[in-house]
């Protein structure tokens, strides 16, 4: 348990201790523009930890749960590219007393971060900006900053879950490797014993071969003597037959 807690603490420390520039970029809402319907539109942008696909889904759920705004569309088209999420004629009291059109894009600056761009207006031709509609533009900034604030602990929890998963996998691998080591050691001991038994058997075989080789040479004399006796007895038998 102590090892598990220490590992998770290390992950958190590594996650929080980002370089100053990276920390300033992540979770910090900034002004920008996006290309929408072949024109540059004023937008607010924020980068968060996580994949573009996961961030897009979370943003849609967060807007639906928190503001009852249902964004549609917005499939990821590749690294750094995105189609647009759209919520037309949405009622967002924190932005405006009127119905508004909201749009969002989600791109992947890297394989581990996502950038959400939020923009919108009262209709297809009027978009909120800092000069012409500072109140709505500021409210939209607050909304996106709230999303970033919600996304940050979520990303940390996901990092903790991933670290826990990796640790559990490492623990399973450790147990498997320990079993393999024990089995191999037992097999080695068994093999060494068998080798010793085979060596003893080979030594006995060599001794037996040596003994049998001597007996084989002796067998030559025995066979010669037996053959001589056989010939002698046959000769005697033949001689007895001739006398009768």
Image (tube, rainbow, N blue to C red):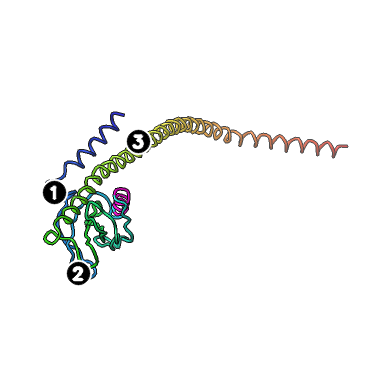
The spot of residue 34 in percent (x, y) is: 20, 63
Q: Which element is circle 3 on?
A: helix
Which contiguous range is marked in magenta?
56-66
> Residue 39's mark?
2
Give the CA distance from mark 2 to mark 3. Answer: 54 Å
Report which residue position mark 1 lands on: 24
Residue that lies at the very extreme toward the bottom in this rendered image = 38
For the point 18% across and 65% down, the residue is: 41
Report which residue position mark 3 lands on: 171
Count all numbered tags in the image, as a single digit: 3
Query: What secondary structure characterizes most of the magenta part?
Result: helix
Would you place residue 148 above or below residue 102 in this image? above
Q: Between residues 214 and 153, which one lies in front from this camera angle?
A: 153
Q: Between residues 123 and 82, which one lies in front from this camera angle?
A: 123
> Residue 156's mark?
none
Dot 2 or dot 3: first in sequence order is: 2
Specify whether residue 102 is in view: no
Dot 3 or dot 1: first in sequence order is: 1
Q: Check whether the beta carbons of the residues at disc 2 and disc 1 lie within 8 A of each other.
A: no
């Amino acid at each position: 348990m102590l090892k598990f807690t220490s590992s998770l603490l290390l992950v958190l420390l590594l996650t929080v201790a980002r370089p100053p520039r990276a920390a300033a970029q992540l979770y910090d809402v900034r002004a920008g523009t996006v290309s929408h319907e072949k024109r540059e539109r004023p937008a607010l942008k924020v980068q968060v930890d996580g994949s573009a696909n996961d961030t897009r889904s979370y943003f849609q759920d967060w807007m639906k749960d928190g503001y009852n705004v249902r964004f549609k569309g917005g499939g990821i088209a590749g690294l750094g590219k995105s189609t647009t999420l759209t919520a037309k004629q949405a009622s967002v009291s924190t932005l405006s007393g009127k119905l508004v059109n909201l749009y969002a894009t989600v791109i992947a600056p890297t394989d581990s971060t996502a950038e959400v761009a939020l923009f919108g207006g009262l209709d297809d031709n009027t978009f909120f900006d800092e000069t012409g509609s500072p109140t709505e533009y500021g409210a939209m900034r607050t909304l996106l900053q709230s999303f970033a604030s919600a996304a940050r602990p979520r990303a940390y929890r996901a990092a903790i879950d991933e670290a826990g998963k990796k640790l559990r996998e490492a623990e399973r691998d450790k147990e498997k490797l320990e079993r393999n080591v024990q089995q191999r050691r037992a097999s080695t001991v068994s093999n060494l014993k068998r080798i010793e038994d085979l060596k003893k058997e080979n030594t006995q075989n060599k001794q037996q071969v040596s003994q049998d080789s001597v007996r084989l040479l002796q067998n030559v004399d025995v066979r010669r003597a037996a053959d001589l006796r056989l010939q002698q007895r046959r000769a005697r038998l033949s001689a007895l037959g001739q006398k009768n």
